[in-house]
Image: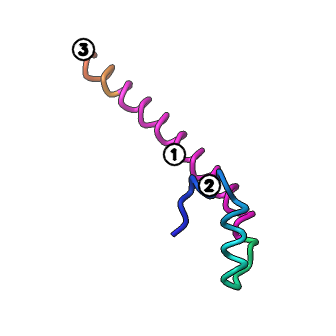
């Protein structure tokens, strides 16, 4: 498994390793976009979760 941090910091190293193994380096070019999409989705999820928790606290304090 390739560490995402290494892939972000040194994609040429990963690309060279794939070529050395006889694999296509194309996946290395697509990986940063997929990683960014994943990170964006996680950030959005965490923001929505924080909003949900905040609203939950407001509901708990509401009267009547």
Q: Which mark is residue 35?
A: 2
Q: Earlier in the sequence, mark 2 or mark 3?
A: 2
- Residue at (74% x, 79% y) in the render: 24
Q: Which residue is mark 1?
A: 42
Between residues 37 and 56, which one lies in front from this camera angle?
37
Residue 34 in percent (x, y) is at 65, 58
Question: Can you tell which quarter of the image residue 55 is in?
Answer: top left
Q: Dot 2 surroundings within 10 Å: few (below 14), some, or many (20 or more)?
A: some
Q: Earlier in the sequence, mark 1 or mark 2?
A: 2
Q: CA distance from mark 2 to mark 3?
A: 44 Å
Vertical comparison of 33 with 57: above or below: below
Between residues 15 and 38, which one lies in front from this camera angle?
15
Q: Which residues are magenta?
A: 27-55
- Residue at (70% x, 55% y) in the render: 33
| Secondary structure state at the residue bearing disc 1 | helix
Q: Nearer the viewer, mark 1 or mark 2?
A: 2
Q: Is residue 27 left or right of residue 54?
A: right
Q: Which mark is residue 51?
A: none
Vertical comparison of 50 with 18: above or below: above
Q: CA distance from mark 1 to mark 2?
A: 11 Å
- Residue at (53% x, 40% y) in the render: 43
Badge 2 vs badge 3, beta-carbon distance below 8 Å: no
| Secondary structure state at the residue bearing disc 2 | helix
Q: CA distance from mark 1 to mark 3?
A: 34 Å
- Residue at (46% x, 38% y) in the render: 46
| Secondary structure state at the residue bearing disc 3 | loop
Between residues 9 and 24, which one lies in front from this camera angle?
9
Badge 1 vs badge 2, beta-carbon distance below 8 Å: no
Q: Which residue is mark 3?
A: 63
Badge 1 vs badge 3, beta-carbon distance below 8 Å: no
């Amino acid at each position: 498994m390739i560490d995402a941090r290494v892939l972000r910091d040194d994609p040429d190293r990963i690309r060279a390793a794939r070529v050395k193994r006889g694999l296509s380096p194309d996946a290395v070019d697509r990986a940063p976009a997929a990683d960014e999409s994943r990170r964006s989705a996680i950030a959005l999820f965490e923001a929505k979760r924080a909003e949900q928790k905040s609203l939950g606290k407001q509901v708990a304090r509401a009267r009547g």
